[in-house]
Amino acid sequence: MKLLLVADSYPPEICAVSSLMNELALSLVDRGHKISVLTCKPQNRVKEGTEHNYSLVSNENNVTVIRVPIPKIHANSLVKRGINTVLLPSVLYSRTPKTIRYDNYDGIIVYSPPVSLGLAAKKIAVLNDAPMILMLRDIFPQNAIDLGILKSKLVIKYFEHVERKLYEASDYILAQSYENRQFLCERKQLDEGKVGVLYNWVDSSKYYRNETTNFRDKFRLDGKKVCVFAGTIGPSQGLEKLLSVARLVGDNDVLFLFVGNGREKDNLMKKAKSMQLTNVRFEDYVEPDEYPSLLKSVQLGLVSLSENNHTPIVPGKLLGYMAAGIPIMAFLNKESTDTMRIIDESGCGEYVTDGDIDTFSKKMRVMLSDDDLRITMGNNGRKYVETSFSVVNAAEEVERAIIKVRTS
């Protein structure tokens, strides 16, 4: 099949979306499909010093990549971000070459968020008389409402309108979890036959390769038992809880390492400084090729969700930790029953759901003091993710969704 993948990020941008779409594209190529990716020109999430003058169309590992210049949709200013998100569909569509818009595609697969991206993808789907499959990874605007990011009734009403249009435009929706599917069918009243489930995925083979970077040396980690949080540092994570754990644990040989960027990073760094925490360190994003080496350099992977985020979610970083064979400690919200099930079934770690700092700290101390327990949990996680969350499974699910729509 000839397929077009649409997403706001693709390498060399450094973020979860970029890695996921790259892995999916390459897996679909391996399965004999002709793949194009329509994405945005890299903006601020690239390695410092990386050249920004990318070609509009290029061939990368047998994937045709189209990078369109758009307004900045990951700006720190919420107002600017909102305006640019509104403009995104028309800008992306108008700046996409006509030869790309119409190329006899058999299917259009669009990644959301941003919620407005699918509206541009739908125009392309109509031109090609092709089904549009929506890979819905976040339920917006509900998550932003829960977190207090969106407060204006007018703005909320507008984005809920866009959300409805996106669901109506989609021929099939792949929710991120069974919780998400239930939410969409019950709260958004979508037809159950229109909504399937596709968990995030991970290419576990990357974690078996030789280390590209020695992060024990690069980040000066020797002599430390390192607990890492790697990913976006934003309002949905509620990372202040981890700072409280760091203060309570307080061991000289334990280091809390935050690797990534995001709107809340500066605030979190200021808070760590005001708390006089000496066992907390912040580093910038590492490149995707280096990420497996980073995880191999630590003892524990940290997951944290804000208690205000009531939309169900399975954090993407969970699967990376599992693929790397490191155990997990997680702060989850009570709606994250799918994530709890994954941790329980796999035996890959521990979690708390009520923000209990004391209980979290006690469980963490037990894990850090028992090397055999960490090895067992890490091996459990690796085996589980290879069986349940491989990129091959994801590619097969995408194929099934397209065939389902085309033959219905």
Image: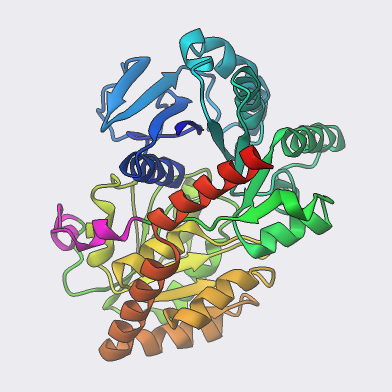
Left or right, residue 336 beside residue 226: right
53 sits to left or right of 24: left
| Residue drawn at x 30%, y 72% as measured from the top left | 325
Residue 83 seen in this snapshot? yes
Q: Is residue 159 depicted above or below 57 in this figure?
A: below
**Figure quadrant of residue 253:** bottom left
Left or right: residue 3 versus residue 141 is left
Q: Which residues are magenta?
A: 203-218
User: How far from the left and from the top, in percent, is residue 369?
Assistant: 31, 89
Q: Is residue 396 shown above or below 377? A: above
Instruction: Pick the quarter of the image with the N terminus.
Output: top left
- The image position of residue 4, as x and y in percent, is 48, 29
Q: Is residue 91 found left or right of 20 in the rendered image? A: right
User: How far from the left and from the top, in percent, is residue 286?
Assistant: 29, 47
Q: Residue at x 46, y 86 (%)?
A: 363
- Which color scheme did the rendering employ for the protein? rainbow
Residue 249, how many percent across, how many down?
41, 80
Residue found at x 15% / y 58%: 211
Instruction: Say if residue 267 shows up in the picture.
Output: no
- Against 297, residue 369 (above or below) is below
- Say which quarter of the image contains residue 206: bottom left
Q: Is residue 163 above or below residue 352?
A: above
Residue 271 painted magenta: no
For this rendering, which residue is in front, 361 or 405?
A: 405
Q: As drawn, which residue projects farthest toward the front?
A: 407
- Residue 207 highlighted magenta (yes or no): yes
Q: Name the residue nearer the viewer: 183 or 148.
A: 183
Image quadrant containing the C terminus: top right
